[in-house]
Amino acid sequence: MLGVIFSTPNEAAPFIEQYAGDRLGELEEGAHLQTDAVVATVVGPGKIKATLGTERLLHEHDIDTLVHAGGAVALADELEVGAVVETAFVLEGDRVELEAPDYPRMPLECPFDLDVEGTLVSQDHVRGDADASSYWERIADMRDATGYAVAYVAAQHGTSCHIVKGITDRADGDTGTVADRREAHRAVAAFLQRHVDADFPAS
């Protein structure tokens, strides 16, 4: 069975609309949508909710492969709002900064045919008034608040995990609009439609 994890109902909405049609409204935090081969859930924002929600999903369902999909903020200049990026490495970004820190860096397989791969840093605490990027932000291409937790729990269960993110905003002050965020979420849903539904059709 394939598991698909989103952080928020807004991130999940385009996929649920495409995958389930009119059978289901908004997928609320903590709820699951299940077919014969696919189960999708919204875990909520932040690493604590992501950890608990992923644990629950993996305990309640026989998941072979997990895909964490949703939005991320671009840290690298080359990532444009609306791009869909596959994660090759995910970092834990809320640790104390050191001159040469040892950081948890988890490599992930990139089995999809996306043109762009990048490093994702997960941070619950982002200082909006900081004069310079943190160490973690300088070595990553994009930022979210859930990816590391999802990948870590999946690794503890021995479950294959992939992370695909749509760029919704930029960290350099070029904040995306609501329309930009919706378009990024739609782009991720279109990716899932092409690369997931072909192998795991809805019943």
Image (cartoon, helix red, strand yellow):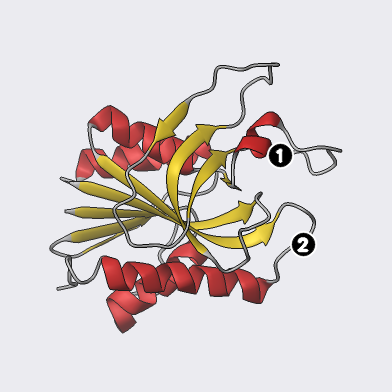
The first of marks 1 and 2 along the sequence is: 1
What residue is drawn where x is 61% and y is 59%?
Answer: 79
Q: Position of residue 103 (x, y in %)?
A: 54, 22
Q: Is residue 159 visible?
A: yes
Mark 1, residues whose alpha carbon is within 10 Å: few (<14), some, or many (≥20)? Answer: some
What residue is drawn where x is 21% and y is 43%?
Answer: 60
Residue that badge 1 annotates: 126
Amino acid of disc 1: Val
Identify the secondary structure beneath mark 2: loop
Picture layout, residue 57 above or below residue 196:
above
Identify the secondary structure beneath mark 1: loop
Picture layout, residue 200 above or below residue 44:
below
Q: Position of residue 24 (x, y in %)?
A: 33, 75
Residue toward you, 80 or 123: 80
Mark 2, residues whose alpha carbon is within 10 Å: few (<14), some, or many (≥20)? Answer: few
Dividing the picture into quadrants, the one containing residue 123 is: top right
What residue is drawn where x is 28% and y is 67%?
Answer: 195
Q: Position of residue 47 (x, y in %)?
A: 51, 37
Residue that badge 2 annotates: 174
